[in-house]
Image (tube, rainbow, N blue to C red):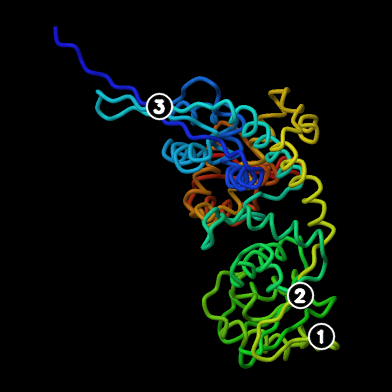
Amino acid sequence: MVKKYVEREIISREFPKNLEERLEAILSSVNTEYKSVTLGFLLEDNWKTSNDIRNAAESYVNPVTNIIPGDTSFKAYCTFTFIPIGAVAEERIRGRNPISYYYKLTEDGEKYGKPIAQFSLRTAVDKNLSMYNIFGFTASHGKTRSPFNTAKILFELEKEDNLRRVDLANECGLVDMAVSQHLLRLKNIGFVNYDSISGEESGWSKYEWIKGKNPENIKPVCKLPTLTKRVANKMKELEISDCHELAEVLDYKHPGDISRILSGLEKQGFLKKVKFKGRKFKVGKKESEASITEKGKEFVYEFLEPVSQALGDDFDGINKEIEIFDDPFTTSDYISRGFSLYEEVCPAYKRKSKEDNESRILQILKNQKLRKKEIDEALGKNVAIYLRELIERGEIKKEREGNAVYYYLA
């Protein structure tokens, strides 16, 4: 009898000792709800394959209601995020084809990663705001990762109000453009107030949305109806902005198009140009002013500071907050809602295909009749357009019972 040679290899890193390095590591591990759930609920102190981790996720949420990542996503979270910071260990078993990979929490992952990830999920769901909206990608052009850079900017603004972009760049050790990107993202979610102007940009104009105007009444500008509507809606939300800022916020590569739309909306009476009285903007230099809002301060006090304290071994600020997860029903509810938050902003899911949404509706209607409101709640969106097309194709039907209209499979 021939014995098979089997080799086992354990890969484990050391959790950072320095508090600042710990904060950078942990924020990159909770910048999405998928990561927070994986680290906070799906990994344990016993070995699991990526398939085991996915099955654990499926035990918490309904795959019809939520999108559950595939095995490779959970493997990537472990390989590229949790293992490098020392929160998760990996076991590789060779001698089989292919190599088998297993994952489990390290002692530091159990002590720091798990409770902070649970706290992150609770914060995101309670605020109805995905951590991805706040921290964005982990990738960064600088030496430190993007989520940590965002936190540094918020901490600086909380200490001293009305800082210029260049001041923040110097204090945080970041390049000017990186600071600008973080400030635009934070402004978009109401965490900071941020105005900027550049003497280098010819034809620059800043506009203000006129209160009381309804963006539904706009007329398309430059034969760009979709972009016109996006610009108008974002201007109403931001109140004051310019073509360069809007191009970044809307992820649109041609600020010139947006500039022409802003001019057109001004002519239609929806915008007015802003005059900066008494503001010091030096020609030839990008000048700006940023300040933290009450909403931003709340996030610093209620999330960033308790996380920092926990990484310094003071868990009082988060332990009481995560006691709710002792209840399995509450845990499932938070995980499902957390997944939904991230699905709405995840670049891979934001543009879910029409076919995918229709397929999910058909799954939901299997063996039951539901009202539109109930289907809206199940998918987390308005499904009117999908219901109409499914009826036209004869895949579903609707009938009235009293004052209610119900939909069911044909």
First in sequence: mark 1 or mark 2?
1
Residue 91 on image: x %, y %? 40, 26
**Amino acid found under the numbered disc labelled 3:** Ile
**Taking the image as drawn, is residue 330 in sight?**
yes
Find residue 308 and report its image quarter: top right
The residue mark sitting in front, 3 or 2, is 3
Q: Total label count?
A: 3
Residue 136 on image: x %, y %? 60, 56
Which labelled disc corresponds to residue 289?
2
Which labelled disc corresponds to residue 10?
3
Which labelled disc corresponds to residue 368?
none
Between 301 and 54, the one lying in front of the other is 301
Residue 32 on image: x %, y %? 60, 46
**CB-based contact (under 8 Å), mark 1 and mark 2:** yes
Between 267 and 334, the one lying in front of the other is 334
**Amino acid found under the numbered disc labelled 2:** Glu
Task: For label 2, count other residues whose C-alpha is less than 10 Å away and answer few (under 14), some (14-19) or many (20+).
Answer: some
How far separated are the C-alphas under marks 1 and 2? 10 Å
How far separated are the C-alphas under marks 3 and 2? 50 Å
First in sequence: mark 1 or mark 3?
3
According to the picture, the residue beneath numbered tag 1 turns out to be 279
First in sequence: mark 3 or mark 2?
3
Residue at horizontal 69%, vertical 76%?
232
Find residue 310 and report its image quarter: top right
